[in-house]
Image: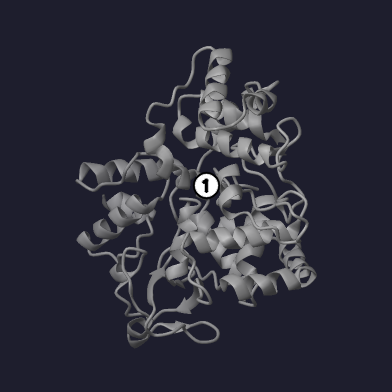
Amino acid sequence: MRPSVSLLGAAALFACLGGAAQAQQVTCGGDFNAFVADLKADAVAQGFEPATAARFFEGVQIDPTVLRADRRQGIFQDPFITFSRKLISQNRFDKGLQMKQRHADTFARIEGDYGIAPGVLLAFWAFETDYGSFQGDFNTLNALVTLSHDCRRPELFRPQIFAALQLFAQGDFDPMTTTGAWAGEIGMVQMLPKDILENGVDGDGDGHVSLKTSAADALMSGAKMLSHLGWRANEPWLQEVVLPQDMDWFETGLHVTKPVAEWAQLGLRARTGSLADGALEASVILPQGRHGPAFIAYPNFSVYFEWNQSFTYVLTAAYFGTRLQGAPIYDAGAPDAGLSGDQMKRLQQKLQERGYDVGDIDGILGAGTRDAVRHAQRALGLPADAWPTPDLLNRL
């Protein structure tokens, strides 16, 4: 199961924004043959040999299935407990431990070079491709050209075409046979061509970066990308905690950070083990309110959002990483009933009418809606834990 855009693939899409200034004149749509001719001309202007560009684009075509996949993508709307239980099966957990042992040497290198625990990459590997068993069967070049020709987000995908062309020139991409996800991601941890160029690592020493067939290459490349995006070496990312009953719930959420020592002074404690260094800044996360699971999020947790904007997906991936490092199954507690999609839309509408910024009225409990709920709860004299309930909806 994959998110709206795969984790490491989404990182590439956001990274592409850095090149958007160069692509302000990007053309899209119109006659497809003329569009491909423009791509060839652009490739030559960038320094590629005309014959190389001609071979690369020979046979490229629009893939309607890519457009359908792009149009139907959406953020997962299940609450954290439901969603995480769906993704983290016993089989997926057991296989993760097996892979941790099987690739122990590679994970040891990753820890030594990048300071990233095995569980972090194992969780991505599991959710992206079920440890490499399903990497997608979309022709990658067709996918990238299709999404570049489409006028919805050409500035994100067009640079990936020329990155793939560079990989082709190096002998590491076959435009006819290279396949992956619908958005152009390739390999076991699903990276876009530009990311492979910038962060690809030849982990197995064969002279090539082969993310589809080499676990060492895929894992080392994923680790380098994490580091590039700001992962702080040898630091934690997430930990389950127990909170005092007199907690000021308004202080929870990713918008509030305090030193770990200050959280401890307020009565927060680790459910197992010890909290991290007291000087680290951290936030307290209550994905389903004060009666549900509770976590402390350390600085590395923010790196997850470089790949995917779905809070529930990100939290599930981070939590699964801790499980693969030995953390117990979280205490689900007894959270208050949440809202259906239609109820959430009504809530968003009511919040918007009261002047709160919730973003789009889309039925999704995103960051804006959570923050608005928190403020509305406080205004109504309710525990401000940012979890919308039928009671809140009725009061509004």
Is residue 53 visible from the viewing direction of this image?
yes
Relative image position of residue 291 (x, y in whole percent): 44, 69
Residue 247, image x and y in percent?
Answer: 33, 77
Q: Specify whether residue 117 is in view.
A: no
Q: Residue at x 29, y 68 (%)?
A: 250
Q: Which sits in the foreground, 14 or 380?
A: 14
- The answer to whether residue 92 is above or below residue 310 is below
Question: Residue at position x 41%, y 45% from top?
Answer: 18
Please give the name of the residue rendered at 71% of the width and 43% of the height, measured from the top-left corner. Answer: 172
Q: Secondary structure at mark 1?
A: helix
| Residue at 67% from the left image edge and 61% from the top image edge | 219
Q: Dot 1: within a 10 Å radius of its alpha carbon, few (fewer than 14), some, or many (20 or more) residues?
A: many
Instruction: Answer with left or right where residue 362 lies relative to residue 220.
Output: left
Residue nearer the viewer, 35 or 190: 35
Q: Which residue is mark 1?
A: 12
Quarter occupied by residue 325: bottom right
Q: Position of residue 58 (x, y in %)?
A: 69, 21
> Front-most of 50 and 119?
50
The colour scheme used here is: one colour
Q: In the figure, is residue 164 to the left or right of 291?
A: right
- To which quarter of the image does residue 253 belong? bottom left
Q: Is residue 151 above or below residue 280?
A: above
Q: What amino acid type is highlighted by mark number 1?
A: Ala
Q: Position of residue 328 (x, y in %)?
A: 62, 76
Q: Nearer the viewer, residue 20 or 284?
A: 20
